[in-house]
Amino acid sequence: MRVFEIASEAVPFAKTGGLADVTGALPEALAGLGCDVSLVMPAYGEVFSKGLTIEPTGIEFEVPIGARAPLARILRCRRPGSRIDVYLVANNELYDRPTLYGGSHDYADNAERYIFFSRAAVELACRLGGRWDILHCHDWQTGLVPAYQKLLYGSHAAVAAARTVMTIHNMAYQGLFWHWDMLLTGLDWRYFNWQQMEFYSQLNLLKTGIVFADAISTVSPTYAREIQSAPGGCGLEGLLSSRSDALTGIVNGIDTVVWDPATDPHIPRPYGSDDVDAGKYAARVALAARLGRAAPDSRPLVAFVGRLVEQKGVELVLEVLGRMAGSGSAHFVILGTGNPEYERQLQRAAATFPGTVDLMVGFDEGLAHLVQAAADITLVPSRFEPCGLTQLYAQRYGSIPVVRATGGLVDTVVDTTPETLRDGTATGFVFEGFDAAGLDAALSRAIEAHADKPLWTRLVRHVMRQDWSWGTSAREYLRLFERTLASAPAPVE
């Protein structure tokens, strides 16, 4: 099967979030299953700072964007040891910028940047030779690809028989733009209607992808159900419900080579499930040094690693710090960056409870590994979570996750109860409602369990043996691709 992965970011080339982790790992896993896979993404400025060998392909073409036709130059590279050709769509005017999408505010021309990229990706697929089976699109930045394939490139042999699969990584980001940006797409205005590309008088690129794709996937089965009703669907729940027969949820995998406590270069003492205590103690010594402490704290270490934004439940963490930090029952470490107001409130909490609450503002991949290795408990109290990777990394490193029952957190964490302990399925602590009382109760249960050394050791060893590798997820994607190829393409009206 020949698969063209189309994404706006991918590890190790450029990254802002979990999307890049998926698009960096999934192509490799599909190739391992026998697929012929290539990946295309924009040639951002930061791609050239990674020390990778990047070569010109000699492929150049103009891409009509409204009244303009900017030039797309196609470059190619591979990361070391990879079997995957990665094609880079280069245009310095559009992509040679300090960040991928903008800083505190999105770039004003993001519509043009990703309309250009989507059309360039389909054009490239036509120029690379051979026939593609699957065009796999990721998030709103590639939402026009299914429409272009059906409406403008249906007679091109390379893509005419291909099926398009649209993967939604987060419904909250839809690519909403001014209605006049429809002119940039080169598509007929008749498609700008409430059933296809229009959303409350705006151009909606994610909606476009959902409407025109032959199959739709998202990153967990529970999230696939949640987005078919409000508020999970973020206004598109009716459309998603109408396409429920084409919608599948597949849990993300993690890179079990990069995230492996037995070989991790970011931690001082590699460890496995049989010597986890020694490995965690060494990590806690190293983390204490990073925090300016002479020795690690003897209390349970509770960590929060992630973006400091509303989705991640930071307000609940703040409330629980106010409730629990004064009791001295645990040591809290928060690593992340995001909303300045959340950062200020967390700084106040750290100042109020010195030695009990430690805050590290910013993000450092190596430090994230060290915190997970040192932690006993990891908090993931998300308001919503399409899949979530933090709880999977935590399990891999023997840090027991405390999660809210939403999205992929439901699909990857089994609540610890007397019943799940007896049958050996417990992998964390789960609370239902989005409230501090629920998080407080779940965290209190975890801390109480931590005091029972035999129980905790059994739980930690069990979670470390969970298989969240990409091999399992890739097989699910391959089955989805096979089903989609065997089905008739989505009709165009």
Image: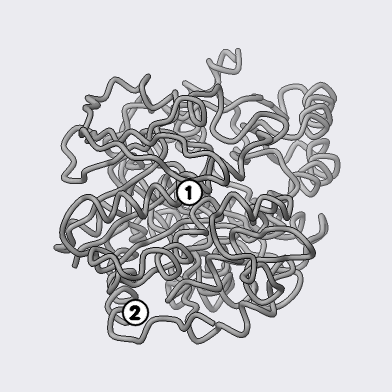
Can residue 332 be seen here? The reply is no
Q: Secondary structure at mark 1?
A: helix
| Relative vertical location of residue 116 with respect to residue 448 in this rendering, above or below | above
Q: Is residue 374 left or right of residue 474?
A: right
Please tell me which residue is depicted at 83% across the width and 36% down the height of the picture.
326
Residue 477 versus residue 175: which sits nearer the camera? Answer: 175
Q: Which residue does the image show at 63% across and 83% down from the upper left?
A: 241
- Where, quadrant-wise, is the N terminus in this rendering? bottom left
Is residue 55 something one can see in this rendering? Answer: yes
Q: Give the Cα distance between marks 1 and 2.
A: 22 Å
Name the residue: 43% across, 24% down: 46
Type of the residue with mark 1: Leu
Crowding at mark 1 (Cα within 10 Å: few <14, some 14-19, many 20+): many
To which residue does mark 1 refer? Answer: 19
Depth check: 261 or 113 in front? 113
Mark 2, residue position: 484
Residue 371 in the image, given as x and y percentages of width and height: 51, 33
Callout 1–callout 2 Cβ contact below 8 Å: no
Q: Earlier in the sequence, mark 1 or mark 2?
A: 1
Q: Residue shown at 29%/79% (left/top)?
A: 485
Q: Secondary structure at mark 2?
A: helix
The total number of labels drawn is 2
Residue 262: give x, y in percent of width and height. Answer: 28, 39
The three-letter code of the residue at mark 2 reads Thr
Q: Residue 274's x, y, as percent? A: 30, 47
Q: Quadrant of the C terminus?
A: bottom right
Which residue is more in the foreground, 80 or 104?
104
- The numbered mark at residue 97 is none
Q: How crowded is the residue under tag 2: few (<14 C-alpha within 10 Å), some, or many (20+)?
A: many
